Amino acid sequence: MSEVLEKISEMLQKGKRKDVAKLCQQAIDEGLEPNVVLTQGLLAGMDVVGAKFKANEIFVPQVLVSARAMKAGSEVLKPYLSEEGATGRGKIVMGTVQGDLHDIGKNLVIMMFEGKGFDVVDLGVDVAPEKFVQAAIDENADIIGMSALLTTTMPMMGEVVKAAEEAGIRDKVKIMVGGAPVTQEFADSIGADAYTEDAPSAAEKAVAFVS
Ligand code: B1M
């Protein structure tokens, strides 16, 4: 692997926000693909952070500084991940489900949606089912996108599907779900229209829905 990618991963693990941002720009300037910088630099570092967190080798404060470094790096990559001139593809309301505060994946997915020319309304984290549905109505959205990182909050995705049915908008919006613990099987069980494993495939799927 390229040295700069290893360095990005390492600095992300250490939570060195400014270094991560600088190295991401350096990687781009060296001609590396933005997607490669994202997956093999930033996300590779975040994987290590996740494994250490699980093993109780690091704790919430360290994870938070790494999360901030991830954000700083993503911001640098954002313009390079966008497709030139892509606009007006459709509208997406997107958020992390109720009870869940993880937003790194959500933000990445939003970045990819925007890169494909979608207009995205970011509802933030800890979003109640009614809020997703009301926003979809108010914004006349084509798609509701949800992210969940906790096994305990995944069921809220099913509540959003139910709320959309009750509000009479289920046939007007596509519902997309994702996040580390979410699976295709789970998405099928709650009646979502799509599950995708990562942010780029979420954006591809969204394009397919509005095409
Ligand atoms: Co949390 N956390 N966390 N955490 N955290 C996990 C999720 C955990 C797996 C860690 C572990 O134990 N190994 C574990 C969950 C266990 C479980 O549910 N079974 C966990 C826990 C337990 C907790 C707390 C309860 C810890 C505590 O307080 N004791 C707490 C819960 C707070 C809450 O939400 N109520 C908590 C808190 C936190 C921090 C605040 C410290 C921080 C979040 C900071 C932030 O988001 N701003 C944090 C982090 C960073 C993690 C890990 C380490 C990394 C998550 C991440 O950002 N990954 C995580 C470990 C892990 O996942 N391996 C962990 C990178 C991100 C890009 O991936 O979000 O999966 P992800 O997104 C991917 C895909 O999933 C997909 O695209 C992205 C990549 O392309 N995707 C979609 C995401 N959304 C999509 C939507 C789509 C399509 C694709 O369509 C719409």
Image (cartoon, helix red, strand yellow):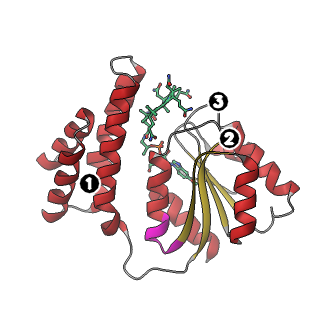
First of labels 1, 2 by sequence position: 1
Query: Residue 175 vs residue 1: left or right?
Result: right
Residue range highlighted in magenta: 113-118
Say which residue appears at 71% left-offset and 40% top-offset: 156
- Residue found 22% across the figure and 52% down from its top: 21
Q: Is residue 159 left or right of residue 94?
A: right
Q: Which residue is mark 3?
A: 152
Specify whether residue 14 is in view: yes
Which residue does the image show at 49% across and 45% down from the upper left? 103
Q: Relative to 167, is 197 on the left or the right? A: left
Mark on residue 28?
A: none
Q: Position of residue 78 (x, y in %)?
A: 34, 63
Classify mark 2: helix, strand or loop.
helix
Q: Amino acid at mark 3?
A: Thr
Question: Badge 3: few (under 14), some or many (20 or more) residues near its Cα, within 10 Å?
Answer: few
Seen in the picture, residue 9 relative to 106 is either above or below; the reply is: above
The quadrant where residue 28 appears: bottom left
Where is residue 59 drawn, in percent x and y? 38, 22
Q: Mark 1 and mark 3: span between their CA atoms?
A: 31 Å
Rendering quarter of residue 45: top left
| Beta carbon at label 3 within 8 Å of ligand 1 | yes
Q: Point out the tag, 1 or 3, that comes first from the N-terminus.
A: 1
Task: Give amino acid for label 2.
Answer: Phe
Q: Position of residue 20 (x, y in %)?
A: 22, 47
In x, y percent, where is residue 140?
71, 72
Picture disc at residue 37? 1
The foreground one among 107 and 205 is 107
Which residue position holds label 2?
186
Number of numbered discs on residues: 3
Instruction: Mark 3 and mark 2 in contact? Answer it, CB < 8 Å.
Output: no
